Amino acid sequence: MDASAATRLDQRFGREPAQETTAPPTAPAMSIADPAPLGLAAFALTTFVLSFFNAGLVSKAGEPVVLGLALAYGGLAQLLAGMWEFRNGNTFGATAFASYGAFWLSFWALNQFFASKIPTAALGHAVGLYLIGWGIFTAYMWIASFRTTVAVSAVFFLLAVTFIVLGIGNAGGTSSVVKAGGWIGLATAVAAWYASFAGVANSTFGRTILPVKPLMR
């Protein structure tokens, strides 16, 4: 029986023709660029400048320059990178960039509004707790990074050590330990810049310019 005959029978017996149940095709979602190089670059530059002060390489009098970077680049730019990673379905990247963007925003807010309200005797312990807490978060993100690349995993390892060392130094009021944390922070910034540069260069040239060595999945 052809389709027209079936339709006539449906009409004769008062039956409605079968309805189309397949949803119409939807347009594919618009792709976006990889936000990771932006997030890594924002983190690297802000960490690099702050670490110069922590390492004692420049006068502490210039430290407020970090606050502008913490707000605009380390904070807002990284937070945006995290939101775009959510859009890309990258749980690791979204958690990392959104969290460290929030870290820099909280660092800015702490220095601008709240540090002056903490008694001087308690400030070192408070900042130490703050930094060690971030070190714990970074440590488990480092474990999660074992399924990313060597370049990214190196960043998280160095960053975890930086947070812990700076936290211990601040809590104990030991300037030499804080300076050591500053030097490790400089190494962290260089590693993050490398990972960012690799992402930009490899994408732009369409081939591997700087290797990042994917880890086994």
Image (cartoon, rainbow, N blue to C red):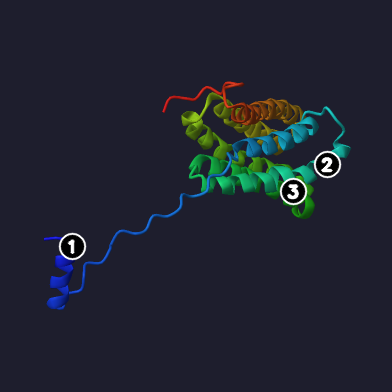
Measured in 3D between alpha carbons, the distance from the residue under mark 3 to the one under mark 1, in whole angstroms, is 71 Å
Horizontally, residue 184 falls left or right of residue 24, namely right
Where residue 9 sits, quadrant-wise, is bottom left
Q: Of the two numbered discs 3 and 2 on the same chain, state the one appearing first in sequence.
A: 2
- Label 2 amino acid? Val
Where residue 81 sits, quadrant-wise, is top right
Taking depth in this image into account, of 129 and 142 the one nearest to the observer is 142
* Residue 209 at least partly seen: yes
Q: Of the two numbered discs 2 and 1 on the same chain, state the one appearing first in sequence.
A: 1
Secondary structure type for disc 3: helix
Q: Which numbered tag is attached to residue 108? A: 3
Q: Of the two numbered discs 3 and 1 on the same chain, state the one appearing first in sequence.
A: 1
Q: Residue at x 70, y 35 (%)?
A: 172
Which mark is nearer the camera, 3 or 1?
A: 1
Q: Which numbered tag is attached to residue 3? A: 1
- Tag 3 near tag 2, CB within 8 Å: no
Horizontally, residue 213 falls left or right of residue 67, namely left
Horizontally, residue 7 falls left or right of residue 182, namely left
